[in-house]
Amino acid sequence: MALQKTGLADQAASSLLMLLQHSSAYVSLLVIYAITLVATELLSNAAAVALVLPIASAVAAGLGQPPMLFATAVVFAASQSFLSPIGYQTNLMVYAPGRYRFLDFFYFGWPLSPAYSVMVPLPLPLPLLLLWFA
């Protein structure tokens, strides 16, 4: 909400759109996915969504794409906190009692994170394609 009221979301979106002006909407979707992925490793997943969702919505509007498509990418990327205990509350709950190290999350999360990053964004635009051909 604060990002929208201050105009920061629109400013960040216009900067992203300028940076990605010669790219397709799908590449822009992947960039939003990657930004959310980095944010969710540094913040909680809810905070990552609150931070990136207004920007993603403004980018979608700037591209003439449905905001729900970009919102779906943000939500899926925010749920992908496999590399650190910070991004997901359950990881934080077991971190100290399980005597895990920060590196343990990275060690077990690194094979899962690239697989998830490849498999999830691929079918995201599928509903749009189905509607386009209908």
Image (tube, rainbow, N blue to C red):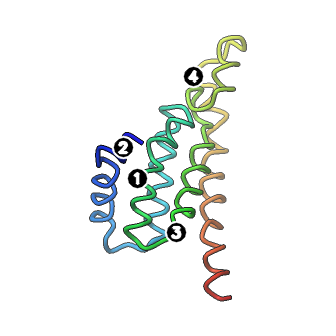
Question: How dense is the environment of label 1, judged by Cα within 10 Å: few (below 14), some, or many (20 and up)?
Answer: many
Give the secondary structure at mark 4: helix
Which residue is found at the position 50% from the left and 39% from the top? 48
Location of residue 92 with respect to 7 vertically, above or below = above
Whether residue 112 is situated above or below residue 14 in the rendered picture: above
Q: Secondary structure at mark 1?
A: helix
Residue at image point 59% right, 57% down:
72
Kind of residue at disc 3: Pro
Name the amino acid, label 2.
Answer: Leu
**Label pair 2/1, CB-CB below 8 angstroms:** yes
Callout 4, which amino acid?
Phe
- Identity, as a three-letter code, of the amino acid under mark 1: Ile
Is disc 4 in contact with disc 3, using a CB cutoff of under 8 Å? no
Query: Does residue 83 appear left or right of residue 52 in this picture?
Result: right
Q: Which residue is mark 4?
A: 102
> Mark 4 or 2, which is nearer the eye?
2
Classify residue 40 as left or right of residue 105: left
Foreground of the two, 117 or 66: 66
Upstream in sequence: badge 4 or badge 3: 3
The label number, if any, that marks residue 55 in the structure image? 1
Q: Give the mark nearest the N terminus, 4 or 1.
A: 1
Relative to 8, is 64 above or below?
A: below
Residue 74 position in % (x across, y down): 54, 51
Q: Which residue is mark 2?
A: 3
Q: Name the N-terminal-most of marks 2 and 1.
A: 2
Q: Which numbered circle lies on residue 66?
A: 3
x and y, in percent, of residue 16 in the image? 32, 59
Residue that protrudes farthest toward the front in the picture: 5
Q: CA distance from mark 3 to mark 2?
A: 20 Å
